[in-house]
Amino acid sequence: MINFDEEIKKFQPSLELEEAEDTIYKDDMPDVTDIIEKILDTVKEEQ
């Protein structure tokens, strides 16, 4: 059986929209277009 009092104690609200955006934009991982651009630049340099 679920103990609701314990579950409420463990509950952590999700990030607010602005906080989530900040977290996402600070993560500077390349996306697919960045990878394709790097590949194209490498191919152009080799020619």
Image (cartoon, helix red, strand yellow):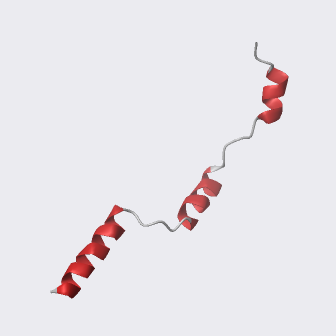
Farthest residue toward the left?
A: 47
Percent x, y for residue 44? 19, 83
- Marks counted in the figure total 0
Residue 38, above or below 2? below
Farthest residue toward the top?
A: 1
Residue at image point 65% right, 56% down:
19
The quarter in which the C terminus is drawn is bottom left
Q: Left or right: 44 with respect to 26? A: left
Residue at image point 32% right, 66% down:
33
Question: Residue 27 appears in which quarter of the rendering?
Answer: bottom right
Residue 46, above or below 5? below
Percent x, y for residue 13? 71, 41
Farthest residue toward the front?
A: 46
Percent x, y for residue 21? 57, 58
Question: Residue 2 appears in which quarter of the rendering?
Answer: top right
Q: Left or right: 8 with respect to 31? A: right
Question: Residue 43 appears in which quarter of the rendering?
Answer: bottom left
- The residue closer to the viewer here, 44 or 9, is 44
Q: Left or right: 31 with respect to 37? A: right
Residue at image point 55% right, 59% down:
24
The quarter in which the N terminus is drawn is top right
Residue 15, above or below 27? above
Q: Left or right: 42 with respect to 2? A: left
